[in-house]
Structure formats: C-alpha cells, structure tokens
Amino acid sequence: MYKVVALTLALFVQGVVVAAQAVANGSAVVNAPLTPADFERALTMNDRYGRLAVNIPEMPFWQIKGDAFVYRRTTRDGHEFILVNAETGEKRVAFDHVRLAAALNEVTQHDFQPEDLPFHRFELTDDGGNLKFRSRNGLWSCDLAIYSCTGTRLHPSDSDYQEEVYDDTPPTKNDPHKWSASPDGEWIAYIKNYNVFLRSKDGLDVPLSWDGSEGNYYALSTLSWSPDSRHLAAYRIRPGYKREVHYLESSPTDQLQPKYLTKVYRKAGDVLPLRQPVLFDITGRHEIAIDNSLFPNPFDVSPIQWWKDARGFTFEYNQRGHQLYRLVEVDASTGRARSLIDEPSDTFVDYRPLAVNQKNTGKTFRYDVDDGKEIIWASERDGYEHLYLFNGRTGALENQITHGNWVVRAVDYIDPVKRQIWFEASGMNPDEDPYFVHAYRIGFDGKGLTELTPERANHHIEFSPDGRYYVDLSSRVDLSPRMVLYRASDNAELMDVETADISELVAAGWRPPVSFHAKGRDGKTDIWGVIHLPAHFDPKKRYPVVEDIYAGPQGSFVPKSFSTRIEPLTQLGFIVVQIDGMGTNNRSRAFHDVAWKNLKDAGFPDRILWHKAAAAKFPWYDISNVGIFGTSAGGQSAVGALLFHPDFYKVAVANSGCYDNRMDKIWWNEQWMGWPVGIEYSQSSDTDNAYRLLGKLMLVVGEMDHNVDPSSTFQLADRLIKAGKDFEMVYVPGADHGTPGTFRDRKLLDFFVRNILGQTPPNWNAIPTGSQTTSRHHAGASSF
C-alpha cells in the first residue's frame, strides 16, 4: 500500500514540476485541468464528426463492361454504394444493401451491417445480376436476383490471396494435372520432377528440359507461350535463403493454450532467389540458349511478355541495389538478349509502378504502341518524373513527351490512334500547393498540353475502360469533395455526380487543418505541412505542439484532400502538425534523394525549420517542449527525433517501428538504404544509437505484427536498458501492425498529457468500459 501511495505522490510531484517548468517557459500547460469527459471526446470525436458529413464520395470505379461506374458515399449511419450510367445519366443505389448484408451473414456467420459491408469495390457481371468482390482471403459471388452469396476461401499460396507476403518466389508444383495450354491447342506444358514437359493431344509426353532440380527448378506459374505456339519461355529458379520470423500468439480466441506461428520474411542482405529466363523451341524440342550477362543479379524480374507477332519477348530487370532498371528483349529465333531501355541511377531507381496513390507510389511506367513499334516510358532522368517516347525496335529515344520542373503522378488513358495521353501531374502551377494533382492531355510528340482541371484543388481522375468518359473527384483539406462526369473527346461536363454536404459538420465545430509552408534546409525549397488546431482554439493563448510523423520515402503523407478526421490530441489542447520534409516522394529527384542510405535524416532539418517558422509567424504556436509520434517507419523516425535531435524534440511515442533497417523487410530497406548492407544501416539504426536517448519515450508493439518483425522493438528496448536509459513500453497481446484499438489510443493521449501538459490522466480502471470507445466498428473486414 505504501508503494502505491508513494508512486502516486511521486507522479503528482513530477506533474507539478513539469507544469512549473512549462509556466517558466511560457508554455500552455497552465490550461484548466482535463477531465475524463475531455478524454472521452478525444476518443470519440472522429466517429461523431463522421456521422455529420453526408454524401462524401470515395474514388469511383468503372465496371469492366458497359458505361457504368460505382462509388461509395457516406450516410448518417455509414456508407452506401451508388451506380451511375454515364450514357443515360441515371443514378441509383447499386443494390439492396439490407438484403446483401443478410445474405453475407447467412453464409459467413458474421454480423455485417447494411451500412458497413466488408468491401470497398466490386464487379458486376451477368448484366448487373451478379456482384463479385474479393476479401483478404476469399472470393465472393452474390446473385442479386435472389440475394444469395457463395464464397471460396483462398490458400496463402493462391495468387489472389490478399495477406501481405514477403516471399514471392514462384512455388514448385510437380503436378501433371496443372498445366499451361498452347494458343493453338496442340500442346500443354506442365512440370514434372522440376522440369518442363510437353503433352500432345494424343497423349504423347515429351521432356523439354533435364536440368531442373529442387535447388534449380522450373516454375509452372512462369510458363509463357509465344502467340504462334512455336516457342515456350519460362523462368528457372534457384531458391534463396528462407528466413523465418516466429510468433507466439499468447492469447488466441479459440483455445486456452498459446499458438506458435511462422512467417517467411526476407530481410535486407539475405540471399535472394535467382530467376533466369529459359527459351524452348517447340518444333525442335530443344532449349535455345540465352546469355544472362545483361541480367546477372536480379532483385526481381517482371513476368515474361511476348510481342504479338511472336518475334520475341520482353521482361523488366531490376538489378539488386536498385541502381539499374532495364527493359530486356529476347529474340525468339536466336535467344539473343539486348537492352531496349536502360534506367541507371547513382542513388536508386524507384522501381515500383507509377500509381494513383499519394502515400505509396513508384516511378516505372511502360506502354507498348503498335506491338512495341514505340514504347512510352516513365523516367526521372532529367530530375523530375516525366514521360518519354522510345523507338521499340532500336531502343533510341524519339522525344521527351512531358517537360518541366513538375512531376507526372499517373497515366490515366492512352489513345494510340489519336496519339494522345491523358495523365495526372503536380507542381505545374506555381501559385498553389505543389502536391495538388491536376489532369492534363498531351500528344505523343509533346505538343498540345491542355489542362483539364483548372480548379484549385487536389484532383483524382478515373477513365472508363473505352476512354469515352472520365470522372473527376476533387477536394482540398478545406474544400468538401465534388464529383463530376466528363466526356473525354471534348472535355464537356456531363453531370454533377455528387457534392458533399458538410453544413452540420461545420456547425458542430469542425475546422479544417491550416496549410502552411516554409523554406527547407537549402533556403530555397518550400516544405509543406498542415496545422491541426486545438478544440476551442483561442489565438490569444499558446498551445503545445506535437508532430505526427511519417517520413517513408515511398510517398508523401501530408493530407491534401478533404477528410472529416481530426487528430484526437487536439481535443486535449494540443496543436498537431504533419510535414513532408526532404526525402519523401512526389517532388523532384533531388528532394527524394535525401533519403538515400540516410533514413535517420527523415527530413528533420526541414521539419525543425518549418516548426520555427510557424512559431515566428503564429504567437500561439509553442515549441518549447515539442512532442512527436509515429507508426512503422514513423515509429523509427519518432525515436530518431529523440536520439538525433534532442535539442528540439523532447517527448515521443513510437509504435510498431522498424528501428534497425537490417531487421525489416527486404524490399523497403534495400530500396532506400542500398545493397550490399553497409555501415549506413548502423548509422541510421535507432538500436545502435540507443545510448543517445535524452527525452521521454514510450514504445508500443503488437505481439502479432506481420508487417515489422516485433523483435525490432524488443532489441531497441534491450539496448536502451543496457545503456541505463528509462522509457515506457506497451506490449499488446494479439495485436497486428499499429496495435489498433482504444487501448493504444488511450496510452498515447496519456503519455503526452502527462509529459507535456504535466497533468495526470484519468484512472481508466474506474471508468465504465462501455464509454471507452473510439469509432465505428468496420465489420471485421480485416479478418474476413
């Protein structure tokens, strides 16, 4: 009893000291004491605000056949799907949500609600009579005439399985009952004893290879027939190191005793599988040798893709280390390999596909014109992501299609007859946020650049499959969404599809974040971010600042489009900011390169200057005791803030972090930190630099984190303990990446309230469990 009282008194005294220090610094901790009701508001306000904004549309998706598109919009209770016929202008509910929920519940034994169905996209087939969708590990089909659903559970080895897989090595399948048929129907190819065999229509079996084995096998999934059926190509695969991460699920829901699980999970530096293309002559029943000197050390190679005239095939070679990306062509008659396009870099080639995704996109794009007579190719070779036109027969550059100090963000549609490209780009307009995406049209020759979305907003375009129509969804953080249908031939506006209603949201006190930019470390480049103001904001007061960080180089993360979401900490009197510093994506190549072999940088020199500029401009912006929090790579950066910039950042919460890049998944870490693994990995390692800790730190880790090896957190904790450092640690049984849930949210709020405001959080054990809620339950879709 004495220890409990003493501990309580110590915490009280600590809070008084922190508050006194804050007063001396002119901080905001002199605010009125927080109550349990304030915390309850912080934990539930996103749910409340979400119910007040109606008809907010999400990204539309076109049906493969016909002129219809579908989108999901908000209602007072959740969401509903709307179907629009672009030809007629008809707009209606896509299906009976109540009956579909009942049909799914009957077959799955779940409790899906009509306003919260377990999918965001679907496909209508049979003239709209059948609805198909994909869950994480299942394919589902629902007959809309009788509202009956059937599903197929998928095995992790199936290509449609949605769980994140860290080993994409094609499996061995010695199964004569699974095959690949030739286009002319004369042969089937299959794998037997790790080799390629042919079987004719009359049942004759013919071996094509003899050199396959368990350690160097042919993979069925890679077999690719030439269109004239005269050749067959495949990859022969030498397996790499099968690294495994082991899990102990302490508290399974279906049994008392713990479970032990294993996941294949390659890490930086591991030996990779070697994929080498092999070519067979079907008429001569022999292999045509291919010289592998152009692709000796692949991190990965793309699937084999034949030219339509069967003259040869191509694949894209991503060399390990990500400093060379190459388009390779193999001649079908001779097996001669040549490079059509080389994309080298002194730092890295962002080899992932160019995608309509602010937070996760790469830079590669390829479109073959007239069976490869010409090739449209994306590249950063002039310092910005742009489109180029190459001669597909000679590999010579014909012309650069797009030019300028701006970035191509997506290619929406290509008309090879009119020789026109519809694409999305950002940074072209000097008087607006350089991350705002707009739509444009341009000719193959680089002429006729036309802007299609002049409205000052962030735009997203979706083209119909036939290219006749496109839908524009636009918004800003301070401008509610609007969805408009256009005709592509003349850009005529056909229909105002949806305009969100946020009147009740605004009346309830919601306010958008404030956009702010300041010069970065070079004194020239604008760094952009947003400021989430505290509830009941009074510009005459001063408020403490907490940064929500994610500095992963795969994207940019400051929101640009409208959202009702608020930062819970703002309900407790904090300013919360988000900033995109150098090293993140969607700006120039030089801006991005800052991350190269230097993830500890995380744009901190730019972020700190941004904070100081905000404090100089806004009297209410208090940076005397700055906090920071982040998840995953954001967790790594949150710890790094205290280790490498302790003069500025004082308090941090790090969730599910990859604190040493040698402990994390291979693709992400070798992409940005390089290969072979060098001293830079240690220099950027929070674990190796744990002895530097000065501020107050809380680590959060989920027991079943399938994204980042949980051992990374424990290794950091071990090093902190050995260095004599003090910190808090939250271990969440059964939780996956990010440890989602009310418990995590409470712990984060408590930590900053205690260590920045100097106040004692509520006694959660004395508060009824039913009132400790966060947001609407999303139907268990993550496990469906």
Image (tube, grey):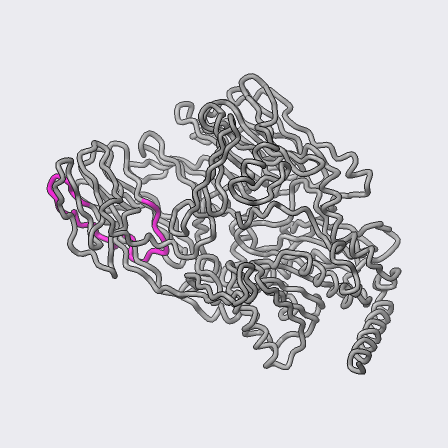
In the image, is residue 640 part of the stretch drawn in magenta? Answer: no
The x, y position of residue 370, in whole percent, is 33, 29
Residue closer to the observer: 104 or 289: 104
**Who's the residue at 67% across and 53% down the image?**
578
In the image, is residue 285 part of the stretch drawn in magenta? Answer: yes
Can residue 632 be seen at all in this image of the molecule?
yes
- The quarter holding residue 685 reads bottom right
- Left or right of 240 on screen, residue 213: left
Residue closer to the observer: 709 or 623: 709
**Who's the residue at 79% across and 64% down the image?**
766
Can residue 587 be seen at all in this image of the molecule?
no
Q: Does 692 appear above or below 192?
A: below
Give the total number of marks visible in the rendering.
0
Q: Does 233 appear above or below 704?
A: above
The x, y position of residue 237, in whole percent, is 28, 55
The x, y position of residue 205, in whole percent, is 13, 44
- Left or right of 442 on screen, residue 573: right
User: Residue furthest toward the top?
Assistant: 88
**Who's the residue at 68% across and 32% down the image?**
55
- Left or right of 140 on screen, residue 91: right
Q: Which residues are magenta?
A: 280-303
- Left or right of 527 on screen, residue 262: left
Quadrant occupied by the N terminus: bottom right
- The quarter holding residue 33 reads bottom right
Residue closer to the observer: 123 or 521: 123
The x, y position of residue 760, in whole percent, is 81, 67
